[in-house]
Amino acid sequence: MSVKLNQRPSFFKVLIMDFTRRLRLPLVFSQRYGSALRGSVRLRNSSGKIWFVKLEQEDEDERYCFTRGWKKFAEDVGLEMGEFLVFRFVGGCMFDVSVYGVHGCEREISGAGFQVEESDSDDQVELSKDDVPNVIKKKRSRAGNTCTSESGRSLKETSPLYFEIRLKPHHKSRVSLPKRFLMAAGLPGKQTVELDYLPKHRCQVVMLDHRQRNRTEIAFGWPEFWKSNGLVFGKTYSFEFKPSRNVIEVQELKTLNYRSNNSYS
């Protein structure tokens, strides 16, 4: 399913029933976009604070709900019966949230969400099976074939959902995920993630190890992944999280004209 570039899906909810543990999304929104957005999503207020929330489908019908993490959002924001919430999808499994009080005016959302550095959210994005949220200004390269940022680097390489590593022997058992990538992909608290090696599309579910202080690593399942796909020490590979598929796509970089700012050893 695809959303036109000039369209941003949105919906509103009036808090008239029990909303403290979960919030049901409107049926039509669920039917159109729920399957593409399910998993971990992010709710962002006007000051840039972010809450991680699970989007899951209810058993009894086609509706999707904000579940795990919603209770904390509701408590942090101080939601009250009768208030009016507007959710606007802005790409990268991110919703901007506005809260209107019972007096009819928008109110400030405070709370203890994560303060995450984000790029300009005003760029238009497309939601499709290959959705990649590129949220920086775009311009055409002289060749006319590649979209680049104003710094001259490709949009993919400037995305927080992308990084590169030169595979070395110390990567044989695990790989560390950059914090910027971890937060943008909504992986904090997740126990597993799926890796998809391109172009063969050989997939492997791997465990995420959050035990290291201030660091998360791809651990159990990683050795099997790189061995079965023939990854080679000394070569450079890209890792890109695809929100619509909820997977990390891995592929070898054949040529490198420069070292990306998202490159890690």
Image (cartoon, helix red, strand yellow):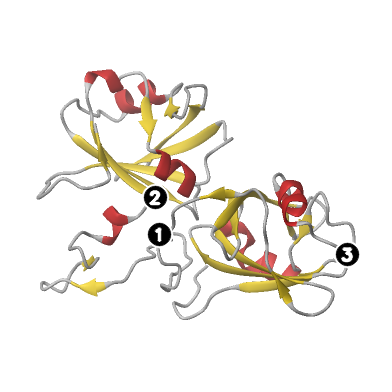
> Is 107 or 84 nearer to us in this picture?
107
Q: Is residue 200 visible?
A: no
Q: Tell me the tag on residue 81.
A: 3
The residue lying at 17 percent from left, 33 percent from top is 235
Assign a secondary structure to mark 3. loop
Assign a secondary structure to mark 2. loop
The residue lying at 75 percent from left, 68 percent from top is 27
Q: How many marks?
A: 3
Q: Where does label 2 land, which residue?
A: 161
Q: Are marks 3 and 2 in contact (CB under 8 Å)?
A: no
Look at label 1 and name its amino acid: Val
Look at label 3 and name its amino acid: Met
Assign a secondary structure to mark 1. loop
Mark 1, other Cα within 10 Å: few <14 / some 14–19 / many ≥20 = many
Based on the displayed image, in which of its 4 quarters is residue 249 positioned? Answer: top left
Q: Are marks 1 and 2 in contact (CB under 8 Å)?
A: yes
Mark 2, other Cα within 10 Å: few <14 / some 14–19 / many ≥20 = many
Residue 106 appears at what percent x and percent y? 71, 75
Q: Which numbered mark, 3 or 2, is in the foreground of this view?
A: 3
Mark 3, other Cα within 10 Å: few <14 / some 14–19 / many ≥20 = some
Horizontally, is 150 left or right of 104 in the view? left
Q: Tell me the tag on residue 132.
A: 1
Horizontally, is 37 left or right of 157 in the view? right
